[in-house]
Image: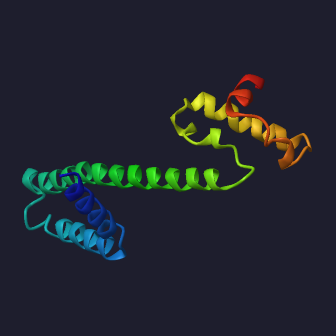
Amino acid sequence: MDEFFTRVASGSARIMGQPLAFIISTLLILIWAASGPLLKYSDTWQLIVNTATTVLTFLAVFLIQNSQNRDGAAMQAKLDEILRALDKARVEFVGIEHLTDYQIERIREALEKDIADGTGKDGTTGATVEQLLKRY
């Protein structure tokens, strides 16, 4: 089931991101708008576009979120591999995406302050994530 959903979500996201999908959507809205006078701008006429756009938006949210979650996890795995492979990189940074927003902001501020102090990159490679959180 997970593999099937991944294929459907990826395919749908790829299709929805194409210019042709936008053009088709625009044409459908124009056709709907043009049909207004024929249907005397009835409640049913309005309900058609409201229902269609609500349902499609609802489904698109799940597909887009799935794609973003998968892309984010893949990016994190790639960055973690880079940290693991580089000699001077601090492997303690692997997994910091699981910290709170406040903790991540404090780490970012500490790194920026270390760089701004003029010690350069070499001056920042010694501190662990825990030391950075304690200092600032």
**Color style of the picture:** rainbow
| Residue sitting farthest toward the top | 134
Judged left or right of residue 48, residue 28 is: right
Tally of numbered tags? 0
Q: Is residue 125 above or below residue 30?
A: above
Q: Residue 108 sits in which quadrant?
A: top right
Q: Position of residue 24 (x, y in %)?
A: 26, 73
Name the residue rendered at 8%, 68% in the picture. 38
Judged left or right of residue 9, residue 84 is: right
Judged left or right of residue 15, residue 124 is: right
Q: Is residue 5 above or below residue 131?
A: below
User: Which quarter of the image is occupied by the C terminus?
Assistant: top right
**Which residue is nearer to you in this view: 95 or 111?**
95
Name the residue rendered at 32%, 70% in the picture. 22
**Which residue is nearer to you in this view: 45 or 107?**
107
Q: Residue 23 sits in which quadrant?
A: bottom left
Q: Position of residue 11 (x, y in %)?
A: 27, 66
Q: Residue 81 sits in which quadrant?
A: bottom right
**Which residue is nearer to you in this view: 20 or 115?**
115
Judged left or right of residue 7, residue 128 is: right
Q: Is residue 106 above or below residue 13?
A: above
Name the residue rendered at 81%, 41% in the picture. 124
Q: Position of residue 35 (x, y in %)?
A: 13, 68
